[in-house]
């Protein structure tokens, strides 16, 4: 084969290879276009309008605007733990009941919860806190004086003793530590009983941006309610909230198993005394005194004042200015006069 023939052969091979590559490229491009054509666009969901939750200062769905709060009595005896729903409450009061153990009043707005409890009986001083929120009071039984007050004060209430629809018993636990309810059942009962659904009250003044509360660092402290009952809070810098402990163990949620975290903690002291052989208590709620506000790893001294049973408690800084709190949940620790606030 001559040199010209060799050169021609080489050119033919190169030309064939180039055409093949071009064909492959066109085929690949065609495949890509085909793939692009069959990809369906992601479905776009409209944003649900939001407003600020008056209990937490956080976003909640617009459908809950002006919703009347639900105030639920939740037990804290050993056999009642862990409880359901406390982490979702906007505000929780922890106050002594009989036997040196506390009980919770959990205030809910803007939450849908399938399980809240265990629900337990009411006491007169818990009514005083529930009325601050114009709430519907949810309980399972009550002390004799509490029943008298419920009637005289004309409080909208749902009582499990006389209601087998709003509550159920969890068979995995022993009575009386197994009565539960849900937000859906409470709202349905409110509807059937003709309870007012809305309220125009405001509750807290929130900081526009998170701030440190005072100049005293406080990341670990303990509250002694009684000799056999203590609460501890330890600050989590990542969550910017305090983890709760009861008698040295994490306070967890029954359904999730996760620890309860609290953004704002208010500590007050109330005059407390035993009034009968059963050990029931009288706690003076309409009063004034000193206390503490704790948030974001810091603590400051405050003053508080409640002028009437149904009046809202007002909280002030030591200079007399209004207390503004950080957005998030709030736990109000009402200790007896002998209670201790321990910290390093």
Image (cartoon, grey):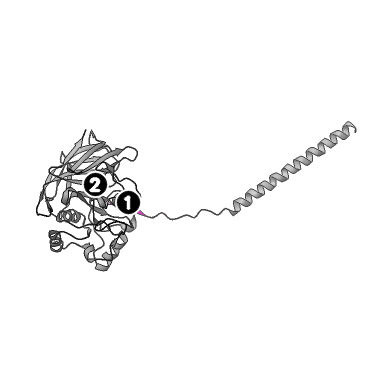
Place of residue 100 in the rendered image (x, y in percent of width and height, measured from the top left): 17, 48
Q: Inspect the magenta stretch and tell me whether residue 176 lies in it.
A: no
Q: Inspect the magenta stretch and tell me whether residue 49 lies in it.
A: yes
Please name which of the two marks, 2 or 1, marks the residue nearer to the observer.
1
The span shown in magenta is 42-55
Crowdedness near tag 2: few (<14), some (14–19) or many (≥20) residues, C-alpha within 10 Å: many
| Residue 34, visible in the rendered structure | yes
Place of residue 108 in the rendered image (x, y in percent of width and height, measured from the top left): 27, 54
Residue at 71% x, 45% y is 24
Place of residue 113 in the rendered image (x, y in percent of width and height, measured from the top left): 33, 56
| Quadrant of the image occupied by residue 176 | bottom left
Do the residues under discs 2 and 1 have CB atoms within 8 angstroms?
no
The mark that comes first in sequence, 2 or 1, is 1
Q: Nearer the viewer, residue 171 or 206?
A: 171
Place of residue 202 in the rendered image (x, y in percent of width and height, measured from the top left): 23, 53
Q: Nearer the viewer, residue 156 or 323?
A: 156
Q: Nearer the viewer, residue 173 or 141?
A: 173
**Spatial separation of the CA atoms under disc 2 and disc 1:** 19 Å
Residue at 12% x, 59% y is 145
Above or below — where is 167 with respect to 234?
below
Residue 9 placement, left or right of 64:
right
Residue 338 placement, left or right of 17:
left
Tell me the element at label 1: loop
Label number found at residue 254? 1
| Residue 324, visible in the rendered structure | no
Main secondary structure along the magenta-highlighted residues: loop
Above or below — where is 36 with respect to 212?
below
> Mark 2 sits on what residue?
331
Crowdedness near tag 1: few (<14), some (14–19) or many (≥20) residues, C-alpha within 10 Å: some
């Amino acid at each position: 084969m001559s040199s010209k023939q060799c050169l021609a052969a080489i050119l033919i091979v190169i030309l064939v290879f180039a055409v093949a590559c071009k064909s492959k490229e066109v085929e690949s491009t065609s495949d890509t276009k085909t793939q692009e054509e069959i990809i369906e666009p992601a479905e776009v969901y409209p944003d649900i309008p939001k407003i600020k939750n008056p209990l937490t200062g956080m976003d909640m769905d617009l459908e809950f605007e002006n919703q009347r709060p639900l105030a639920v009595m939740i037990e804290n005896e050993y056999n009642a733990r862990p409880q359901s729903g406390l982490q979702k409450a906007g505000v929780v009061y922890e106050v002594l009941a009989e036997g040196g153990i506390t009980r919770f009043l959990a205030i809910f707005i803007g939450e849908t919860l399938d399980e809240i409890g265990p629900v337990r009986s009411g006491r007169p001083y818990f009514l005083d806190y529930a009325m601050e929120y114009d709430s519907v009071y949810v309980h399972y039984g009550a002390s004799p004086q509490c029943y008298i007050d419920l009637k005289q004060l004309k409080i909208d209430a749902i009582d499990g003793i006389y209601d087998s629809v709003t509550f159920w018993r969890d068979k995995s636990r022993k009575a009386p530590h197994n009565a539960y309810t849900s937000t859906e059942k409470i709202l349905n009962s409110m509807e059937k009983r003709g309870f007012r659904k809305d309220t125009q009250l405001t509750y807290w003044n929130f900081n526009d941006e998170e701030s440190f509360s005072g100049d005293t660092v406080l990341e670990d402290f303990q509250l002694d309610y009684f000799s056999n009952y203590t609460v501890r809070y330890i600050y989590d810098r990542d969550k910017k909230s305090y983890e709760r402990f009861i008698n040295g163990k994490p306070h967890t949620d029954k359904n999730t198993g996760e620890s309860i975290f609290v953004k704002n903690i208010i500590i007050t002291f109330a005059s407390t005394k035993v009034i009968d052989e059963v050990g029931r208590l009288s706690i003076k709620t309409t009063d004034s005194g000193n206390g503490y506000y704790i948030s974001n790893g810091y603590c400051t001294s405050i003053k508080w004042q409640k002028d009437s049973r149904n009046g809202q408690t007002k909280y002030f800084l030591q200079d007399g200015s209004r207390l503004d709190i950080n957005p998030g949940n709030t736990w109000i620790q009402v200790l007896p006069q002998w209670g201790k606030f321990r910290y390093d």
